[in-house]
Amino acid sequence: MRDEIFLRLLTNELSQLFNLDVSILTHEGGDPDSVCSAHCLKKILTDFFKAKNVRITIPDTPSAHTKTLLEYFNVELSNNVENSDVCIIVDAGSPEQLSKYSEIVFRQDVKIIVIDHHSNTNNRYPASVKVYSNEAYQSVSEIIYDLAEYNGFEFNLREVEAILIGIYYDTARFTVADLETSLKICKLINRGITLKDILARMEQTIDLSERIARLKGAVRMKIYRFKDWLIVLTHVGKFQSSVARSLVSLGAHLAVAIGEVDKSRVVASIRASQDFVEQTGLNVGVDLAERIGMRLGGHGGGHASAAHLECKSTIDELITHIVDELASRLNINPEVLEP
Ligand SMILES: [Mn+2]
């Protein structure tokens, strides 16, 4: 178990849910970690902590990956958070990520609990919200796994599979799994899980428009060389996170994919390679997404190597801010590489 004190506090909190109506909310669109952890949290709340009624809500339209998982695990969704006594937010580092449900964190008539693992989550919610966030955890699915183990609760094979899928995607397909996570992966696989069927199904869900976005993102990117670091910035209408991720696997140390929401508002996904994060000590969630998002009248956040921001600016303005910020943080003047 990664952090017993954290698990004890969380257990104490959840012990108070006996006989209560609970809504579990993911961040907008959901993702494998948030959906899988919500699914398993529902199980443990119902069977172990004896909550009366537990519903799962995903703000906005579920993403393609999310839809596949919802079907696979037979997860029923609800849009009714109104009548809940308690609302548990999973995997959302700030209220803005709840989209149309973001106001709920300010309501006084419903208790709000956050279970998360992003950087700086503790400072992002109003003081009335009970935040259980631990950056040491590589996924919320892992928190739920530890929570079950701490309380001696056993998940069945299907739930164990969900935990493993959550861990798989939040560790960039196990590539950044640390020792603790790797030991858990072994234990989970030892219970008799093979991921090949579900992964094949998930990979098929990369549709044509996402592939086109990735390729267009590559064609439009601008390459900045900060000595030995290659940083690329591009713009695409949709699938920014998929585009940024694919540009890192193409060879960039850091990739930013920006999308225009309207004339004065943009969103951006940032991904960085592990060696870049380790050697520069830069946390793209805090140092880039949160900082620049707030500076430009928006918000942002995430992890050390993956982040998202939304702000009031044009694509070009945002590019300038990101390049300037990197230049000052790395203390290097970049050179623009000609295509
Ligand atoms: Mn996560």
Image (tube, rainbow, N blue to C red):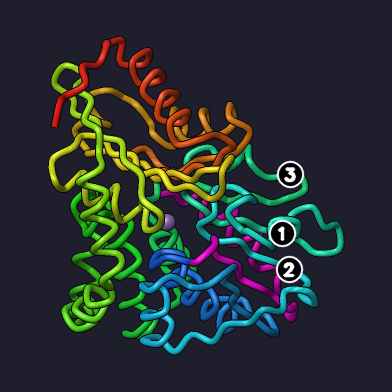
Image coordinates for residue 190, horizontal then vertical, percent: 18, 75
Q: Are marks 3 and 2 in contact (CB under 8 Å)?
A: no
**Magenta-drawn stretch contains 2:** yes
Q: Quadrant of the rendered structure where residue 338 is?
A: top left
CA distance for labels 1 and 3 = 10 Å
Name the residue located 19 percent from the left edge and 33 percent from the top edge: 275
Residue closer to the observer: 9 or 323:
323
Q: Is residue 21 left or right of residue 76?
A: right
What residue does disc 1 label?
112
| Start-end of magenta stretch | 1-29
What's the amino acid at mark 1? Ile
Considering only order in the chain, which callout, 2 or 3, is on the residue closer to the N terminus? 2
What residue does disc 3 label?
126
Q: Is residue 292 left or right of residue 269?
A: right
What residue does disc 2 label?
86
Name the residue located 27 percent from the left edge and 48 percent from the top edge: 217
**Residue 299, above or below 146:** above
The quadrant in which the N terminus is found is bottom left
Q: Are marks 1 and 2 in contact (CB under 8 Å)?
A: yes
The quadrant in which the C terminus is found is top left
Q: Is residue 206 visible?
A: no
SS class, disc 3: loop
**Residue 332, above or below 38:** above
Image coordinates for residue 218, horizontal then vertical, percent: 21, 47
**Residue 84, above or below 184:** below
Name the residue located 69 percent from the left edge and 62 percent from the top edge: 101
Mark identifier at residue 282: none
Image coordinates for residue 116, horizontal then vertical, percent: 51, 53
What's the amino acid at mark 2? Val
SS class, disc 2: strand
Considering only order in the chain, which callout, 3 or 1, is on the residue closer to the N terminus? 1
CA distance for labels 3 and 2 = 16 Å
